[in-house]
Image (cartoon, rainbow, N blue to C red):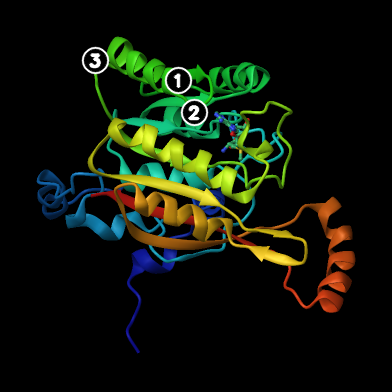
Amino acid sequence: MKKKNKKEIYKIKNKSELIREELGLSYIVEKDLSPIDIKKYEHPKTTIFNDIDLNNWKDYGDIITDSLWLLGSRDKSGAHSGEYHGNFIPQIPHQAIMRYTKKKEIVLDTFLGSGTTLIECKRLGRNGIGIELLPNMVKRAKELISQEQNPFKVKTDIIEGDNTVFETIEKVKKTLRQNYNAEKVQLIIMHPPYHDIIKFSDNPNDLCNAKTTDEFLSKFSQVVKNTYPLLDEKRFLVLIIGDKYSQSEWVPLSFYTMQKVLENGYKLKSIVIKNISGNRAKRNAEQLWRRRALGGGFYIFKHEYIMFFQKR
Ligand SMILES: C[S@@+](CC[C@H](N)C(=O)[O-])C[C@H]1O[C@@H](n2cnc3c(N)ncnc32)[C@H](O)[C@@H]1O
């Protein structure tokens, strides 16, 4: 049997390392560098779409590369409150930003909600622009984002408006020019309503109020078309979506929306399946759902999708 060296035996993870590991978050590996190590870090080998140094790829154990994401509890640190019904857990934008952007680049979230993406942007040193339809959510997102520290001095902007219309996209372009002296962003994140599963508002322009699946898909497709010219060549779009069940039929919104992205100039790079873990209130309802499932011949949703596309 291989004998463990002293360093391996006495290396005990500290509390912060353990918490970050459980949440699936990144941390910079701090090392006592030997002269050989210093040489290794002198000439980083990176791709066009992130800062990951491939010469030292073993340092990035926290970055997920498998297609099954069994994420632990929600990251509630800093300004992440988790209060908005229908938000995603911060580990999702965290992983996407680490994987598909470099420091100081610009991320566009077209369905901003409570601002989770922009909070992560501040934390990771990326600039961020969000589009959100509902004025009360814009206000709340601004409050939350301002509570997060800004160690890398990046900028965040929220555009209030309907992402399906030309005027809103013009506002994004204006913000890019005025605040960033830029024409394009380097990552697009889309976390639309899963059609009518959650009623975010009565606003007729809210995708949750689309009257049919076809109308929902046509509006979603419009958002993909509108934002396509804003993304730099060969960069990534990340779509987070789940399916729904309606009139005793499984409606695969995820595959329908995937098709819309593919029809609009992107190629598919990966489909990730992510667990959905219920809270205490949901757990009581679970027994009821189990009975319904047994009687109705269907399975209960325990997953959603994160899809990764690259601009052709
Ligand atoms: C699933 S939530 C996004 C949650 C977000 N990821 C978070 O962590 O808070 C979808 C958001 O899209 C917004 N929305 C719906 N239709 C929209 C539209 N046409 N234009 C802009 N935003 C829209 C809703 O108001 C809602 O806040």
Percent position of residue 15, x then y: 56, 49
Mark 1 sits on what residue? 168
Which mark lies nearer to you, 2 or 3? 2
Q: Secondary structure at mark 3?
A: loop
Q: Is residue 207 left or right of residue 223?
A: right
Q: Looking at the picture, which amino acid does disc 3 mark?
A: Asn
Percent position of residue 293, x then y: 81, 73
Q: Looking at the picture, which amino acid does disc 2 mark?
A: Asn
How many marks are shown on the rendered structure? 3
Quadrant housing the N terminus: bottom left
Q: Is mark 2 within 8 Å of ligand 1?
A: yes
Q: CA distance from mark 2 to mark 3?
A: 22 Å
Q: CA distance from mark 2 to mark 1?
A: 6 Å
Ligand 1 lies in quarter: top right
Task: Using the image, tell me which numbered label, if any, was put on residue 290.
Answer: none
Q: Is mark 1 within 8 Å of ligand 1?
A: yes
Give 215 or 15, whichever is nearer the viewer.
Answer: 215
Q: Is mark 3 within 8 Å of ligand 1?
A: no
Do the CB atoms of the residues marked 2 and 1 lie less than 8 Å apart? Answer: yes
Percent position of residue 53, x then y: 21, 50
Give 126 or 228, whichever is nearer the viewer.
Answer: 228
| Identity of the residue furthest to the bottom in this view | 1
Task: Using the image, tell me which numbered label, if any, was put on residue 181.
Answer: 3
